[in-house]
Amino acid sequence: MKKVKTRFPPSPTGTLHIGGARTALFNWLYARHMGGTFVFRLEDTDRVRSKEELVQSIVDALNWLGIDWDEGPFYQSQRLDVYAEYTQRLLDEGNAYYCTCSPEVLNEKREAARARGDNPLYDGTCREKDLGPSPGAVVRLRSPRTGATVFEDQVKGPIATPNSQLDDLVIARSDGSPTYHLAVVVDDITMGITHIIRGDDHVSNTPRQIILYRALGVEPPVFAHVPMVLGTDKKRLSKRHGATAVTDYQGLGILPEAMVNYLARLGWSHGDQEFFTLDDLVDKFSLENIGKSAGVFDPARLLDLNADHIRSTDTYRLANLVLPHLEKRGVVPGDNKRLIEAVETVQPRSKTLEEMAEGLLFYYKEFEGYEEKAAKKFLTPDGAKWMSLLARALEGVDVTDQYQVEAAFQKVMDETGQGFGKIAQPVRVALTGKSASPGMFELMRVLGNDLVRARLARAIAHIGD
RNA sequence: GGUCCCAUCGUCUAGUGGCCUAGGAUAUCGGCCUCUCACGCCGAAGACACGGGUUCGAACCCCGUUGGGACUACCA
């Protein structure tokens, strides 16, 4: 059997969004799973809408996700001569012809047909005229008039379209440039693509492209059409749905492996398994297990998966990943060892790197004030009394030594007859500014002797005011 | 309008004729654990769009209905 070769061909008219990223991922996974080749290509024949900086943003997004390519990037805009060559060949062999119908006339005919209730197809006015090239003429493919075009979609099953519903599509514009259909087909042929995994919105284009393959005397590749990704309102995902670019999620503190995991599970499944590493996916990915129906993008699921991945990532890497999110908040931790220890304390309670950075702040910055509700409830005269006792019990104690700290707490508990929780809550607020935080002992260990003492004193003074 | 595609809990899904009084995950709610918050654990609620067939038997097969969606460009 031929070696598998897939491709991802975005057009650089926008950033890489969720749906595109999933398509890229599926192609990449399939190639990797099959030990095949993955090609990256840019469909930039739309000169007005294509932008070079968008190419870069797509590349960045792919890199972030960990999707690499074996060939490319190829630019369609640099392959114009190839398309021209194939167009000429189609012309020479009688599989294409020049058409001089004006857009205006075509439009009128289309509208008339629609009004009549017919499918608005090109009526073949120039099909048998045997016209030569002329300014303003386009090239059309000569498609079969009868019969049906059938293909076996790897996810949808057999799909048949009557050829009577397919008209002679334009393959070269009047300025000589290729249209999308010609360009993709020629590219996929010349690049030796064996499997085309793309969005569901291309199913109805597929028969036309198959006709083109046949006209070129080439056996069409295998097609697999992946259903669309929808927004919460079940409409096609768009900017209206908030963050839709994959890099938005990078900024939000999503781990790339969580994104990949989520994307893979949106539309593909492997029994009941929810958590996947990249290697896992490469190992288990298959076309057969792609679902047939469209799926809604659910940020809650992404977040949950992200939390799972955060929990299973080693703290060294997490520390590096959270750095930019800390810097964004004006924190530049100098001590890497301390950062790693701090990260460890917030790791199980962070859904994103943003949350993690937020939860790390009190280790590095003096907080402005105390959380209002927490202060009201815990920074009371009793609280001050207990904290004073604790401060005294802590004299000469190394707060990074859990056993010594426990003993100090025990002493206060004995003196006051209060339980651990009673005493710990005011202390927690004093040390972190909030009523929710990592555990008391790990908290103190990372904070260190100076900060623990200073913040205790500060809180006691605060209550005294 | 025409052609094509799709249809299981709110959401992502398992399910490929008997294992389904439909499983998992997430979100929601309740409880346990506990120094707080998380994590973890236990539990509740929650779906086969509808109608006909086929079959001893249908979430699974067929037809229809309804509802979504895609395409219908000298855009990709």
Image: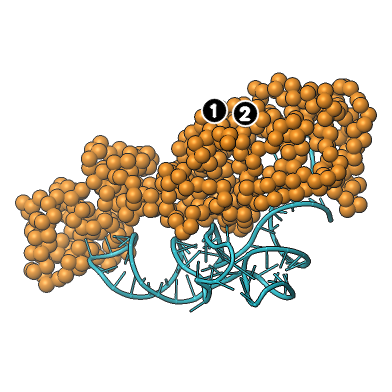
Chain colours: A orange, B cyan
Residue pointed to by mark 2: A191
Left or right side of A42 for A206: right
In terms of image quadrants, where is residue A122? top right
Which x, y percent locates residue A186? 69, 29
Q: Amino acid at mark 2?
A: Met
Could you tell me which secondary element the residue under label 1 belongs to?
A: strand
Is residue A188 among the parts visible in the rendering?
yes
Where is residue A91? Give x, y as percent.
82, 25
Residue at 71 percent across and 45 percent down: it is A151
Of A235 and A96, the residue lying toward us: A96
User: Which residue sits at x=18%, y=58%?
Assistant: A460
Looking at the rendered image, the quarter that the C terminus of chain A falls into is bottom left
Image: A464 above or below A189: below
Say which label, 2 or 1, has the lower sequence index.
1
Element assignment for label 2: loop
Observer-nearest of A300 and A433: A300
Q: Are marks 2 and 1 in contact (CB under 8 Å)?
A: yes
Measured along the vertical axis of the image, is residue A87 above or below residue A369?
Answer: above
| Residue denoted by label 1 | A71
Q: Amino acid at mark 1?
A: Glu
| Residue drawn 56% across the image and 32% down it | A39
Q: Is residue A169 left or right of residue A390?
A: right
